[in-house]
Amino acid sequence: MNTDTMNTKLKSTGTDCKTCRAHLADLFLDESHIATHPQLAAHLAACKECTTELTALRSTFALLDDWTAAEPSPYFDSQLHVRLREAEAAAPEGFWERTRSFLLFSTGRTLRPALTGALAFAMLIGAGGLDLILHQSHISPATSATVNDLKILDNNAQALQQMDQLLDEPTTGNEDTNALPTT
């Protein structure tokens, strides 16, 4: 289809093929959908490709409605079990074949303890990591050397004040005034 015809079709219907194809399932399943969207009806009237696609969709579903599945043989289950037993009994050739057959034919009972242990180990590692993260968030940040020096000076100033208070205590009459008080 040339571009002039496509442009006139788009101008005349107000919708394009992409939009119409997006609504094909709705048009097929719900007959009232075309009444609620008149631009789609106009596009289908003008576009042969979209009309052909809608007709093909309807004919495909009509064929599917008429199709019936073949009934399985009455011995299907017994033949299937025989084949499964033969496949289980055949010796695998290599490591990867043995692993593949083990995973395909085993019930998983032998893997359950190993998987349970692996899951428990993963939970312990996860809980330990979470505990470590939570405890690290409560640790106060390391103080700098300047802050430590200021704390030491403050302690020294308090000690000097206490010493001054001991020296300034009033003395009783029988003590020597020049002697330092003993503690």
Image: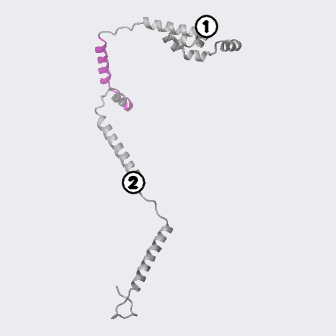
- Whether residues under marks 1 and 2 lie with C-beta atoms below 8 angstroms apart, the answer is no
Determine which residue is flagged by label 1: 45
Q: Nearer the viewer, mark 1 or mark 2?
A: 1
If the image is split into quadrants, where does the N terminus sit?
Answer: top right
Horizontally, residue 84 falls left or right of residue 163, namely: left
Q: What amino acid is labelled 1 in the image?
A: Ala
Q: Depth check: 95 or 71 in front?
A: 71
Where is residue 83? Give x, y as percent. Answer: 32, 18
Vertical arrangement, residue 117 with respect to residue 18, above or below? below
Res 3 quadrant in image: top right
Tell me the magenta residue range: 75-97
Where is residue 68? Give x, y as percent. Answer: 40, 7
- How many marks the image carries: the answer is 2
Q: What amino acid is labelled 2 in the image?
A: His
Instruction: Name the residue at the right extreme.
Output: 4
Vertical arrangement, residue 119 with respect to residue 16, above or below? below
Name the chief secondary structure element in magenta: helix
Vertical arrangement, residue 138 with respect to residue 155, above or below? above
SS type, badge 2: helix
* First in sequence: mark 1 vs mark 2: 1
Q: Depth check: 61 or 162 in front?
A: 162
Q: Residue at left 30%, top 35%?
A: 112
Determine which residue is flagged by label 2: 135
For residue 164: magenta?
no
For residue 79: magenta?
yes
Where is residue 63? Give x, y as percent. Answer: 46, 6
Q: Which mark is residue 86?
A: none
